[in-house]
Image: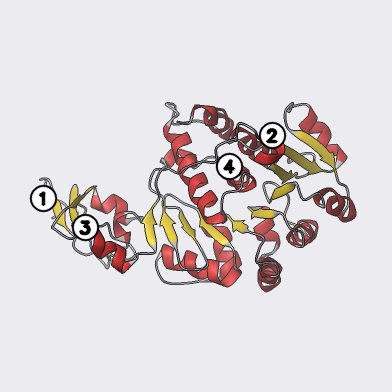
């Protein structure tokens, strides 16, 4: 069929493709158009199913919205979010204070990307915290982002003791080390909401149960984890199942919201809810892109969004940033500058 040289239309899902996982069961038809009914299946939005389906049309066959509400589905395709709005009578502290932990003096760029993304998405204040040598590098690049020295765990704990500092991002080029792991533990012992990204996840990969225990010790404090597939495999050791099932399992295991990144990023909640994102272009696969996503997530979390909503919104916005750039060979710096152009 695939070599027939004529347009291919599939009904429901392309023949040979698993409707739950989007993976072929052996050979699979690659359709130009797939017509499905009432609601999309996971395979229509998960890779590689999304490519195998071609254009997807959801047709009405007379099933009313009441049926869907009765079923109460827990999986959705991500959509344009409603973002926090600043109050006319508010001030900068009402809009949150995001904190980003810096890497060493030769690894500062990732923290800057995250901090600038958090600031541009609307958070009231952003501070980068780190060693004096790293802060000297940051000072040459930043103006509206504040800098704070915390050269040891005691200093970091004192800095974070201010409850107005309500969201912390650790991971972007933080370094894979015991120091990073200890900082994760210290941060999770506080009350601020936390985004665990990149090196923060890898630094805890050998003692994952400890990490999960730290997350679950304070249920009121929201935690978002942002692994790509490699970090996910190191952290969770979950095999089999669809990407959605694996992400939900990881969220339930850890007690955190999990953003399992990729062309079909999945955001999962420990209660079984999940979204699949479909608006991200392939050009987002560039160095520093994940740091921008971590910053967007932290900024929205600091502004008071619930963690699941903040994660879903950040993922959608991240995709829109990529779509808004005409040059497909953009850099992460371009993504940050594009934030102010978001609709």
Q: Is residue 124 left or right of residue 285?
A: right
Mark 4 or mark 3, whichever is nearer to me = 3
Q: Which mark is residue 296?
A: 4
Viewer can see residue 110: no
Q: Are marks 4 and 3 in contact (CB under 8 Å)?
A: no
Residue toward you, 20 or 106: 20
Residue designated by label 1:
4
Q: CA distance from mark 4 to mark 2?
A: 20 Å
Q: Mark 3 — residue?
A: 38
> Residue 123: horizontal and vertical position, in percent?
64, 38
At mark 2, the secondary structure is: loop
Q: Position of residue 2 (x, y in %)?
A: 16, 53
Q: Which residue is disc 2 drawn over?
A: 91
Q: Residues within 10 Å of mark 2 (few under 14, many from 20)?
A: few
> Of residues 19 and 307, which is closer to you in this image?
307
Q: Is residue 77 above or below residue 113?
A: below
Foreground mark, 3 or 2?
Answer: 2
Say left or right for 120 vs 144. Answer: left
> Is the C-beta separation of discs 1 and 4 under 8 Å?
no
Query: Can you say whether 199 is above or below 293 in the image?
Result: below
**How packed is label 1: few (under 14 Cα within 10 Å), some, or many (20 or more)?**
few
Disc on the earlier residue, 4 or 2? 2
* Residue at disc 4, secondary structure: helix
CB under 8 Å between callouts 4 and 2? no
**Mark 1 vs mark 2: which is more N-terminal?**
1
Q: Exactly how many numbered labels are in the figure? A: 4
């Amino acid at each position: 069929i695939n070599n027939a040289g004529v347009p291919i239309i599939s009904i429901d899902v392309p023949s040979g493709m698993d409707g739950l996982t989007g993976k072929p069961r052996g050979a699979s038809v690659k359709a130009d158009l797939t017509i499905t009914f009432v609601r999309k299946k996971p395979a229509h939005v998960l890779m590689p199913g999304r490519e195998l389906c071609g254009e997807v049309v959801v047709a009405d066959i007379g099933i009313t919205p009441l049926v869907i509400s009765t079923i109460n589905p827990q999986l959705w395709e991500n959509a344009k979010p409603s973002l926090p709005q600043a109050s006319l009578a508010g001030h900068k502290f009402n809009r949150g204070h995001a904190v980003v932990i810096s890497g060493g003096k030769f690894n500062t760029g990732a923290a800057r990307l995250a901090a600038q993304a958090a600031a541009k998405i609307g958070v009231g204040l952003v501070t980068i915290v780190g060693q004096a040598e790293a802060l000297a590098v940051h000072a040459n690049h930043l103006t509206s982002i504040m800098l704070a020295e915390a050269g040891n765990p005691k200093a970091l704990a004192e800095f974070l003791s201010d409850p107005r500092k309500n969201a912390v991002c650790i991971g972007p080029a933080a370094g894979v080390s015991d120091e990073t792991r200890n900082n994760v533990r210290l941060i999770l012992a506080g009350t601020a909401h936390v985004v665990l990204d990149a090196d923060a996840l890898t630094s805890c990969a050998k003692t994952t149960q400890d990490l999960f225990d730290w997350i679950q010790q304070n249920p009121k404090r929201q935690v978002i984890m942002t692994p790509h597939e490699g970090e996910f495999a190191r952290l969770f050791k979950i095999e089999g199942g669809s990407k959605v099932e694996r992400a939900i399992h990881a969220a339930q295991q850890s007690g955190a919201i999990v953003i399992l990144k990729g062309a079909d990023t999945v955001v999962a909640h420990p209660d079984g809810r999940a979204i699949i994102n479909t608006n991200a272009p392939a050009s987002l696969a560039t160095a520093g892109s994940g740091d921008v996503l971590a910053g967007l997530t932290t900024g929205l979390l600091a502004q008071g969004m619930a963690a699941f909503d903040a994660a879903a919104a950040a993922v959608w916005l991240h995709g829109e940033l990529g779509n808004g750039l005409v040059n497909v060979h953009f850099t992460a710096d371009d993504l940050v500058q594009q934030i102010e152009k978001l609709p």
